[in-house]
Image (tube, rainbow, N blue to C red):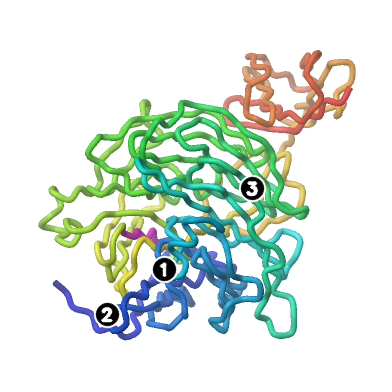
Amino acid sequence: MMKYAYLTFVFAFSLLPAYGQYQPDARWPLGAVEFPGAPYSGNAWVRFENDSVVVEPVDLNMNFEATVAVASDTAGNILFYSNGCNIYNVDKELMTNGDGLNPGTMSDQFCPFFGYPVPSGAVALPHPDHPTRWIVLHLGAGYDPVRKITYGPLYFSEIDMAGDDGKGSVINKNNLLVDGDVESFAMTRHGNGRDWWVVTPEFNSNKYFIHLLSPTGVSFIGIQTIGDPMGCRRMGASTFSPDGSRYARAGSCHLVVMDFDRCSGTFNNPLGTGVPPYTLAGGGAAFSPDSRWLYTTAQLGIYRINLEDTPLELDSVFRRPFYFDEYPRLYNVSLANMQYAPDGKLYVGFVHREKFLNKISFPTANGDSIYYESEGLPLPVNNVRTLPYFPNFRLYDQAESFCDTLGIDTPVNATVVPLETWKLLVFPNPVQNGKLFFDCSNTTQAGPANIQLYDLYGQVIHSRAVMLLEGVNELEVAGLPNGVYVLEVTGQGFRKMAKVVVQE
């Protein structure tokens, strides 16, 4: 077994040309503060900077059990961090009003001694309209005699970094977003390039609570019921693809993958598959960089799904018995949550204490092959279930969509499919007299096409095949309730969408 001297480790990385431009995820706090004098007890910083990954021991004055949130400015300088119990500032001190997150019995039991016990249970998002403010989403927990731990409610707290001291303060906290029995939430950027979608699934259900973080704050958009209920005893994880076009929910007995519309915040095309009973889901899920493959962890290894296959089928990438000789440490670990870093690598944590993180690299951009390193990121301290939780901060506007109106054109590290330059024009908008017209006169794509009209919950209101004309096309929408809808026109080599308002 290779031995490591616990000094500062530096590793080269090769992906993400956008690295260095926007770095709110450049600092990762890790580590478990155990008994006084216990070996490998303490904290560590993982810093993604310049062309290296730097790991160093540090005293953060905080213990982590599973939950961790952290925020850095655009230059990668630390602003604050949290273990789900308290929020500390850059000076490693309790932020003003930064105590008492996730109130309840679980907090009373864990917070005086450890951190909060929910993996991927907190995230810090920059406020879309206040440059000094941050929104921290944090997931509470409870106890059940059979399931042991349950998730919920989902809260948010607001931090303002304004002030001469630069230490910030919590201006409101523990605001209730979703009550009840839920699973891990996931986030992706709105198609306007500024706002954030937050999706929280209900436990053992096919209901999804949808919120939007916009300049007006965190707003409840609605509940979408879609696909089959999970029906699993144990919870797993949920995540969005790097380009925001897909969403996955991984449980202990079932996987669900759906298309996601970043403009309307709705799901479509749910696909599912069971998982082998021996997988014992570890609570991790992540897409490949090109959003084609889905990876999920299990205590027995890592599995993947080619999302272009029908039906979806799990494929074993690494299983402990098979890869025992090549990856001896993999035989002794129980894999857990997964998180992309600014270096383009996918890091994997564990259910128990270990002094390293696994690392997955992608030699090719399409994700067909991966390179797995069992001890890819050595740590100077023990770490347990603790891995920061970030969305893809480098995803911005959805070009050529009806919600791409803000001119936010920062490059993204996601696969972008080139689209034609013509736009789908709809009128009158709002609709009048039950008739809607859409103009395709500035395209040469006349011919067979499909028209679908969705409501904001992703339900198809109208669908039919048409012969697209080079000019004005008519759609009958009489009898629709007042509201906002999405018109989608698809044909050979193109897909166009536009927002439709019914207000009669």
Disc assigned to residue 114: 1
Question: Could you tell which of marks 1 and 3 lies nearer the N-terminus?
Answer: 1
40, 399: nearer the viewer: 40
Q: Left or right of 248: which side holds 457? A: right
Q: Quadrant of residue 159?
A: bottom right
User: In x, y percent, where is residue 104?
Assistant: 53, 56
Q: Quadrant of residue 257?
A: top left
Disc assigned to residue 478: none
- Residue 346 is a magenta residue: yes
- Residue 476 is a magenta residue: no
Disc assigned to residue 38: 2
Q: Left or right of 165: which side holds 429? A: right
Q: Amino acid at mark 1?
A: Phe
Cβ atoms under marks 1 and 2 closer than 8 Å: no
Q: Check disc 1 and report its element: helix, strand or loop.
A: loop
Part of the protein shown in magenta: 345-350
